């Protein structure tokens, strides 16, 4: 699945010369937490989000104590501009991570998680064509079809063994699978409780089984001196 399959095409954006108050009004009106900032050529030049507005002077009821000039750092100056600037260009984040329409959704989801951001502009030929948000990713999860195993004990057994090998690297010599009347039973030894839980998640996530019986033993591997 690619970005073009889930992205929002009608993107609410704003100009870098628009006022901060106008940006806030747009976010409140559209119930969104961030806006791509688009220059006169239609290119993404920044993002303005709720996080960029949390330290605004409008929410500070007492002035900060004055500091000696020699104690004012570059970071202090950047914060001052962000909290006092009147236009979007003063407060927006300029290092914008973007993706293409053919970018894989899994890669976009990883970028959102790693960079702790809520949305990713989608650009083509340097122009904004859409946006993918965390909510779009959640819809993918909600609409994903459940993996239904084929009917019959032998077919279920083969499917479980295949998934154990492909997902967790567990062969039939390590973990033995038996199926009776649709109930899956696993025997064998694993190195940790965490791996045992991963196996449980794998089996119970498969649709079409009648139940799961865990007979696995946890036998930690001890390093030898």
Image (spheres, helix red, strand yellow):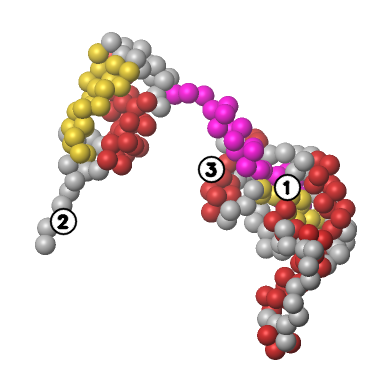
* Residue 219 appears in view: yes
Q: Distance between the residues labelled 1 and 2?
A: 50 Å
Callout 1: few (<14), some (14-19), or many (20+) C-alpha neighbours within 10 Å?
A: some
Q: Distance between the residues labelled 1 and 3?
A: 22 Å
Closer-to-camera residue (84/122): 84
Q: Which is more N-terminal, label 3 or label 2?
A: 3
Q: Mark 2 points at which residue?
A: 223
Residue 21 image-quadrant placement:
bottom right
Q: Is residue 200 above or below residue 33?
A: above
Return the x and y of residue 167 as percentages of the image width and height.
Answer: 35, 37
Closer-to-camera residue (202/124): 202
Q: Name the residue under label 1.
A: 33
Residue 162 image-quadrant placement:
top left
Q: Does the magenta stretch include residue 59?
A: no
Placement of the C terminus among the 4 image quadrants:
bottom left
Label 2 or label 3, whichever lies nearer to me, is 2
Q: Mark 3 points at which residue?
A: 106
Q: How far apart are marks 2 and 3 (CA)?
A: 36 Å
Q: Residue at horizontal 21%, vertical 27%? A: 215
Q: Which is more N-terminal, label 3 or label 1?
A: 1
* Residue 46 appears in view: no
Q: Is residue 173 left or right of residue 130?
A: left
Q: Is mark 3 on a helix, strand or loop?
A: helix
Callout 2: few (<14), some (14-19), or many (20+) C-alpha neighbours within 10 Å?
A: few
Q: Is residue 123 magenta?
A: yes
Instruction: Identify the magenta region.
Output: 122-147
């Amino acid at each position: 699945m690619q970005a073009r399959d889930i992205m929002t095409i009608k993107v609410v954006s704003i100009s870098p010369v628009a006022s901060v108050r106008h940006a806030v009004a747009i976010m409140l009106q559209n119930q969104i937490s961030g806006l791509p900032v688009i220059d006169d050529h239609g290119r993404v030049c920044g993002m303005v989000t709720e996080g960029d507005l949390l330290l605004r002077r409008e929410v500070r009821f007492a002035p900060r104590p004055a500091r000696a000039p020699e104690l004012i750092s570059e970071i202090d100056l950047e914060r001052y501009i962000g909290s006092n600037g009147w236009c979007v260009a003063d407060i927006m984040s300029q290092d914008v991570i973007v993706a293409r329409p053919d970018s894989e959704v899994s890669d976009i989801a990883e970028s959102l998680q790693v960079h702790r951001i809520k949305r990713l502009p989608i650009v083509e030929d340097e122009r904004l064509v859409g946006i993918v948000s965390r909510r779009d990713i959640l819809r993918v999860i909600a609409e994903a079809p459940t993996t239904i195993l084929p009917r019959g004990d032998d077919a279920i057994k083969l499917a479980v063994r295949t998934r154990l090998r492909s997902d967790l690297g567990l062969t039939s010599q390590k973990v033995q699978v038996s199926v009776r009347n649709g109930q899956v039973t696993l025997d064998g030894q694993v190195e940790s409780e965490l791996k045992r839980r991963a196996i449980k998640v794998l089996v119970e996530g498969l649709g079409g089984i009648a139940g799961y019986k865990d007979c696995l033993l946890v036998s930690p591997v001890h390093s030898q001196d």
